[in-house]
Amino acid sequence: MMKQLSQRLLGPVTLVLLGLTFWLGLWVTPPDKVQGNLVRLLYVHPAIAWVALYVSFGTATIASGLYLWKRTRSLTMDRIAHCAMEVSVVFIVLTLVTGSIWGRPTWGVWWAWDARLTSTAILGVLALGYLALRRANDDPTLRARRSAVFAILSAINVPIIHFSVQWWKTLHQGATVFTSSRQVLVHGVMAWTLLISFVGFTLLFFWLLRARYRLEVEREESSAATLDEVLAARRSEGAL
Amino acid sequence: MVLKNGFPLLSGVDLDIEGGSLSVVTGANGAGKTSLLRLLAGLVALTSGEASVAGVDLRAGDLRQLRRRVGWLGHEGSFYDDLSVRENLVFAARALERPVSDIENVVGRVGLEHRIDTTTKQLSAGQRRRLGLAWLLLRRPQLWLLDEPYASLDDAGRTFFDDLLADVVAGGATVVVSAHDPLRSAELAPRTILLAGGRVVGGAR
Amino acid sequence: MIRTALLVCAKDLRIEARSRVLLWQVVPFGVMALLLSGLALGPAHAGSSSAGPGLFYLVSLFVALLMINRSQGIESTPGTKASVATLGLDPAGVFLGKSLALAVELWITGVVLLAGAVLVLHTALHGAVLALPSIGVTLAAIAAAGTLYGALTTGGEGAATLLPVLTLPAFAPLLIAGERSFSAALHGGTLWEWWVILVVALVAYLAVGILLYGVLEES
């Protein structure tokens, strides 16, 4: 019952939090001393990037790992990985778009060869590669195995992205919320807006994942019905 | 059931094959002969149903373990084309931890001693079949699965195969062969299994 | 595992030595690609040693794609795959053997391409020699990654076109680290970060390959 209640509340709570983010971000929070109103984009960009790089890609990787582990192997895990990766592609594109929109007035260009931007774009192509790999294999078990291994290989890139800012020290901002000594740099209503944004976009990911998962289950049920017809036709080949 | 890309290659196959016997699976093109042999070899996955081969459960068991116990001879090329007969067999012998000296014996038995240093791509179809048999003789598996071994063979080649298989069965191995021609197959073996539309539809002892 | 790796590596290298695809097709392709990259830069920049490391690695990646396809193609004819499957080879050993063979082939091609970069792109010889260790590790990491990605694509629809889609993004961090360490060898600069990336990537791909190549072989 708790599970059903939480599932029913997921959508409304997500909408409320996102609505709150946009209201606070656009109207309530003050402009930044240096960036002015451009800072308002930063109430969504880091949250979207967090979901893209860690939540969605992480979910796909964990589900892929669980698929490969014999004890938890099931096509449910494969479905979760596939759906999470699809949602990840959407969030990665949004990360790059919002980042570009912020970058244009800040850096003067839509695209800069910054380590984090570049690595995020690479991760986006990897996610598209995952989807391309799935399309290349019709057999469900073969597809699940190969996709799972590929997702884990792609996840190797996530720590490279994480460390890229410290190691390459290019145009991208350094740590925005915490310094390396864990001192908080953002205060007051800005900090609350950022926190609500992170929670809201994370819940949005799970809402989209659930919707996409349901669609996938319906698609497979429709394929199973087709299999019955194909089986009947195959058996009629053997009728003497 | 065995599904490939959503198509049921085999379904409703109810079969028992005794150890130490020679069986022939026969049927028209597309009946499922190759699929059945590949299933028995652990080369394709069982989608639903129960099956056990050489003591290994095909759904839950270790298929890698099964493959070590079976010998497979497909109708496609089975070896590394750029390696010679000797090099292919040395590779197999080292992989199986058999003495390399065994190679001379098996090559002689299959009549390829004069082609031992010829690269595989230069062999005829019949000679490639003999190389496949040499590979199996080196392996000495419990279960031999031969997919249309008589295709492209002349009468002498067929007689050679029949004699060799009779020896192998006499030695205690189980042999399953697929063949198109039911008349010849009835002469060959005590048991035939007739497949059509992915199912067993008949057979004789 | 090691015994199987050496057996498979020797087999792959023997096939390569017999067929001479590396010598007559891949190396000439690499040399031509290097020449084309010089032409693409234009006469003012073609002889610039600052372009050398990046172009060297870019061409190496394209060469690697050809070699990965070839390495997997050897195993993926249906009959060969089935026959070899019955030998019961340790998949981790197969992965290591194929990666090692591919690495040797890439090192051989890499030496030729490096000579090409020194000759036609005017990359400094002294710096190129200093960069050899990092080049060796980068190409080894590409070989390990490529063997894994190659196994993911064999037998699938459009395998030859799918391979670059999957591998090039994954190779990008190796390309960056390789180019940076090569440039540092040429012009001076800190090397250790790039070595960390290269070694971590190599170890990670080897570890994943040893653990998961068996799963891909089951496919």
Image (cartoon, grey):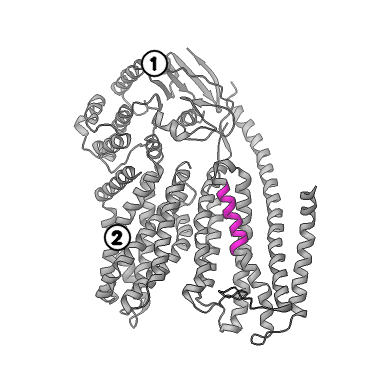
On the image, numbered disc 1 is attached to which residue?
B188
On screen, C78 above or below A110?
A: above
Q: Quadrant of the C terminus of chain A?
A: top right
The x, y position of residue C141, in whole percent, is 38, 59
Q: Are marks 1 and 2 on the same chain?
A: no
Image mark count: 2
- At x 71%, y 77%, the residue is A190
Q: Where in the figure is residue B152, as x and y percent of width and height?
A: 34, 29
The front one of A187 and B141 is A187
Q: Chain of mark 1?
A: B
Relative to C163, is C45 on the left or the right?
left
Is residue C54 in view? no
Q: Secondary structure at mark 2?
A: helix
Give the residue furthest to the left.
B114
**SS category of the residue bearing label 1:** helix
Residue A49 on the magenta span: no
Residues in magenta? Answer: A53-66
Which residue corresponds to mark 2? C107
Return the residue found at the far bottom. A33
Q: Is residue B40 above or below residue A63?
A: above
* B127 in relation to B170, above or below: below
